[in-house]
């Protein structure tokens, strides 16, 4: 059915951004599957953001709770909980040792 194909192809453009905090550190993961996203969010007390569009690009997610020595927000930690989708937004800053 032509109408059915349109609906299915439109759902392929949907992604689920899951955001959670663990030990005061924010983490993020992107899922293609809604059930997996909600399951991951459920065990982490996380936020699920449903995003749709064919040309979607995540530039970065920053954490205003954690800041570098210059006061700039640091990137959220990336967790690859849904498979091999390696999309780190920025290189991690090196820790300053006293």
Image (cartoon, grey):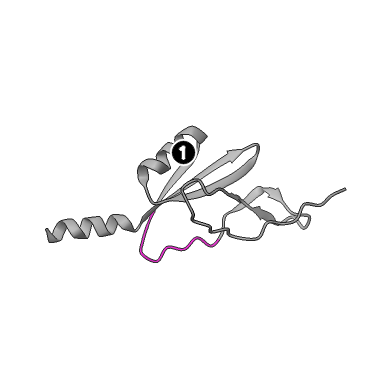
Please tell me which residue is depicted at 41% across the width and 39% down the height of the picture: 38
Q: Quadrant of residue 20?
A: top right
Q: Quadrant of residue 37?
A: top left
Q: Quadrant of residue 11?
A: bottom left
The spot of residue 52 in percent (x, y) is: 36, 57
The spot of residue 29 in percent (x, y) is: 50, 49
Residue 6 vs residue 45: left or right? left
The spot of residue 65 in percent (x, y) is: 67, 46
| 38 in relation to 5, above or below | above
Of helix, strand and loop, which mostly describes the magenta segment?
loop
Helix, strand, or loop for circle 1? helix
Residue 60 covered by magenta stretch: no
* Bounds of the magenta segment: 51-59
Residue 3 vs residue 66: left or right? left
| 53 in relation to 50, above or below | below
Residue 54 covered by magenta stretch: yes
Please tell me which residue is depicted at 50% across the width and 45% down the height of the picture: 81
Please tell me which residue is depicted at 69% across the width and 48% down the height of the picture: 66
Residue 47 vs residue 3: left or right? right
Q: Which quarter of the rendering shows the N terminus?
A: bottom left
For label 1, the residue is 41
The local crowd at label 1, few if under 14, some if 14 to 19, many if 20 or more residues have their Cα within 10 Å, is some
The spot of residue 49 in percent (x, y) is: 43, 48
| 26 in relation to 59, above or below | above
Please tell me which residue is depicted at 60% across the width and 44% down the height of the picture: 26
């Amino acid at each position: 059915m032509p109408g059915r194909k349109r609906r299915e192809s439109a759902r392929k453009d949907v992604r689920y951004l899951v955001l959670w905090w663990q030990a005061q550190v924010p983490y993020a993961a992107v899922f293609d599957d809604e059930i997996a996203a909600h399951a991951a969010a459920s065990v982490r007390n996380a936020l699920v953001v449903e995003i749709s569009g064919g040309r979607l690009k995540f530039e970065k997610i920053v954490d205003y709770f954690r800041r570098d020595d210059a006061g700039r927000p640091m990137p959220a930690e990336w967790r690859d909980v849904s498979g091999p989708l390696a999309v780190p937004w920025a290189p991690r800053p090196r820790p300053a040792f006293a």
